[in-house]
Amino acid sequence: MSDHKTMTLTLIVWRQKGPNDPGKFETYTAKGITEHHSFLEMLDVVNEDLIHSGKEPIVFDHDCREGICGMCSQVINGMPHGGQDRTTVCQLHMRKFKDGDTIYIEPWRARAFPIVKDLIVDRSALDTVVQAGAYVSCHTGGVPDGNAVLIPKPAADEAMDAAECVGCGACVAGCPNGAAMLFTGAKVSQYALLPQGKPEAAARVKNLVDAMAKCGFGNCTNHYECQVACPKGINVKFIARMNREFIKAQFA
Amino acid sequence: MILDGKCPTGPIEQTWDKHRFDLKLVNPANKRKYNIIMVGTGLAGGAAAATLGELGYNVQAFCYQDSPRRAHSIAAQGGINAAKAYPNDGDSIYRLFYDTIKGGDFRAREADVWRLAQVSNNIIDQCVAQGVPFARDYAGYLDNRSFGGAQVSRTFFARGQTGQQLLLGAYSALSRQIKAGTVKMYSRREMLDLVVVDGVAKGITVRNLVTGELESYAADAVCLATGGYVNVFYLSTNAMGCSVTANWKAHKKGAFFANPCYTQIHPTCIPQAGDYQSKLTLMSESLRNDGRCWVPKKKEDLGKHPNEIPEEDRDYYLERKYPSFGNLAPRDIASRAAKEQCDDGRGVGPGGRGVYLDFATAIKRVGEDTIRERYGNLFEMYEKITDENGYKRPMRMYPAPHYAMGGLWVDYNLMSNIPGLFVLGEANFSVHGANRLGASALMQGLADGYFVIPYTIGGYLATVKPAGTATDNPEFKKSVEDVKAYRDKLLSVGGKKTVSEFMRELGGLMWENCGMARSKASLETNLKKIPALREEFWKNVKVTGSGADLNQDLENAGRTADFLEFGELLCRDALHREESCGGHFRVEHQTDDGEAMRNDADFCYVGAWESKGEGKEPELHKEPLKFDNVHLAVRSYK
């Protein structure tokens, strides 16, 4: 079906057998790649070659391949998700590369995200942060009508801006401190902006910040690399809002 | 066997309320003595695990992803229906019920659909309370949009990411229960067997996808909320990990598979660009609120830039064929219409498999900025994938497999024919009949999870002794040994073809011969070719690595092996159903102008298949469908 010109690329990929094994870079060649291949489809081609030659394919996390599940997680040429504005790895296409390019592919690297194998890391620390209180403690049933509590459109829209986070962890991977401030700030802000989240706001922000520290995430020193890495364009203003909420909570 | 759905009788408006009262209860102190297994943590599974945990049951939840927040429910774009009637446009619970029965081409149970429509309003309230940021108007009220198959605006939405926001709501409720200790979460686990003890579902065997270890879990009830199976077509809008595996393993342990031939092909997806492609991307049905579908009238215009084709040489085929619903015709109808134009040699783009979705008229009417505000993220996604600007030239679209209406057979309580095995969400067959309307999948997943299973499972548990079976029962050991032997068999074939080569081949057969149009001849071809392909698979597949490690090649091999068995059942069901209804279109059964022709005299039933073991033909059981409220009629959107 494709009558496009093809590219040949050199891939330098991080391979690591398990969490306690030393990892190293291996070099592979990707052949017959067109501009319409997605980055992960390019890796599929390389993996098919590896399987044919009896070698173990490169393992990487991926699922929806349409930029919403947050599963894919690769640092490409030093940039989480490859550096294209507001794009996950799975939505990055090979037209952004040229024939003959050398591409470095690594896993997320952060203290809170131990490597599981090759390009797969363990991001359960993000779940732990959410479990610390990123919710409204309402039971199923017994809630008022959806229109009983009005929400001003600007508040609903801003809460939605924060809620777009896909939980991929690129912000952590991009941060020199391995901080999860953007992820956590977005969660804190979403609920702080909505009337439904207000009663628990003070306890929530304290518990989430505490959980972040316990999980081994670093602190924010205003590099803003997280915002650049974020495939959903979550704004660092949500970190500022979290800081404000945190200070407010000390007096609550 | 004639199956009994155990639907309550009497006036439809009272069925669910009366049934809820009739169900036995488990008292609060006893709930904590019961264990429940939940496989899958999407909208149905996540909502159910959270709610059952809140009620006091001990829940063990499982998902194959690294976190419950990633289930494929997250990818739903457009919205969720509810009969709130906020816009004052004549909607009601009865109308949502009516539209869903009609949209499903009269192949769903009335009582189940009524219940869905009734609880739809509770879902919106629940999600708002959780902090789901639905779209609102300037006065702060909830906003609505229109969707296919309905003439009222009843769809609630959160930009183009409604599924994501609803799933994150369920995930937040689940996270709260995990913290509280009522739910124990097991991620990166794949269910590979159902454990049945003396005819009753008592547990599962899973593979730990990180360590490769096979693990046993026992419970008083097992719930499957494991999604749909349209990855049997290889290229679909489903996530890469979506499979039939959990359902298929349960089927092989005795659970009936209902209506597998009802598959939904979504009309607006980005067309395939090459043979290397791994999946197809959907563009929300909401685009058809403003986009107009057309193809060139003349074949000689096919090579031209679309903007150079004059208005009079364009065929706006949906507006021509269905003037009253126009571009908002239901999915099955819109998909078939697109295929018809391409089969006629007037399809656009590579391979002639595409139609235009044109926004020029809407942009002229309301301006590009308004269109950007409404669908900006979709235009952006289209451009990332195709490198084409949808504002400047019409988008190219082609139908793609999207959703499974069929699934494991369940009764009104969502219990399968195996006592103790419950099936929720897309994994069951219950409410969409032969075609699902847009914005109804999210509604069903959350209805089952928040508002149905929490009641109906109590009715079952009240009849069984808690913690009656533990993993030291010999059935668990046997199950682990079977799974281990099967895994070792996959690893030891040592052939020459990769797993994805087989999966692509199967997908090709399914799409060509059992896709949007099916015939006796094409289905019979598949019933020969699929078993042959399966035989080749077990002689010639090459699976690398070991079982005692994270091994994605092995995971895919297992899922493909199951699809190779399931694909045959799907074709068998399609062959037996000598009628066209909803997503199931048999070319032998159509009207003169190419519309689907149902056969209510012979096929007004749910077809549920029982596995008879390897190498034996499955047996068909029927559950007759009765329509006391919505009268059987020819579905028309003209």
Image (cartoon, rainbow, N blue to C red):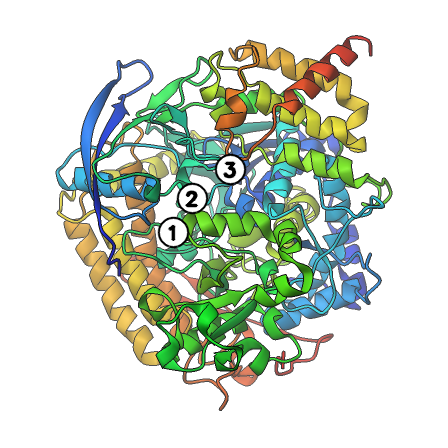
Answer yes or no: do the residues labelled 2 and 1 have beta carbons within 8 Å? yes
Find disc 2 in the rendering and name its residue: A65
Q: Chain of mark 2?
A: A
Answer yes or no: do the residues labelled 3 and 2 have beta carbons within 8 Å? no
State which quarter of the image contains the C terminus of chain A: top right
Q: Chain of mark 1?
A: B
**Furthest-front residue in this view:** B308
In the image, residue B33 lies at what x, y percent? 64, 29
Are labels 3 and 1 on one chain?
yes
In terms of secondary structure, where does tag 3 sit?
helix
Marks 3/2: CA–CA distance: 12 Å
Indicate whether B88 appears above or below B36.
Answer: below
Name the kind of residue labelled 3 in the image: Arg
Are labels 3 and 2 on one chain?
no
Q: Which-is-in-front pick, marks 3 and 2? A: 2
Residue B441 seen in the current view = yes
State which quarter of the image contains the N terminus of chain A: bottom left
Find disc 3 in the rendering and name its residue: B70
In the image, residue B389 lies at what x, y percent? 48, 54
Q: Which mark is residue B279?
A: 1
Q: Chain of mark 3?
A: B
Indicate whether A225 appears above or below B465.
Answer: above
Q: Which-is-in-front pick, marks 3 and 1? A: 1
Q: Which mark is residue A67?
A: none
Viewer-nearest residue: B161 or A80: A80
Viewer-nearest residue: A250 or B211: A250
Name the kind of residue labelled 1 in the image: Lys
Residue A74 relative to residue A248: left or right = left
Residue sitting at x 53%, y 15%: A223
State which tag comes first along the sequence, 3 or 1: 3
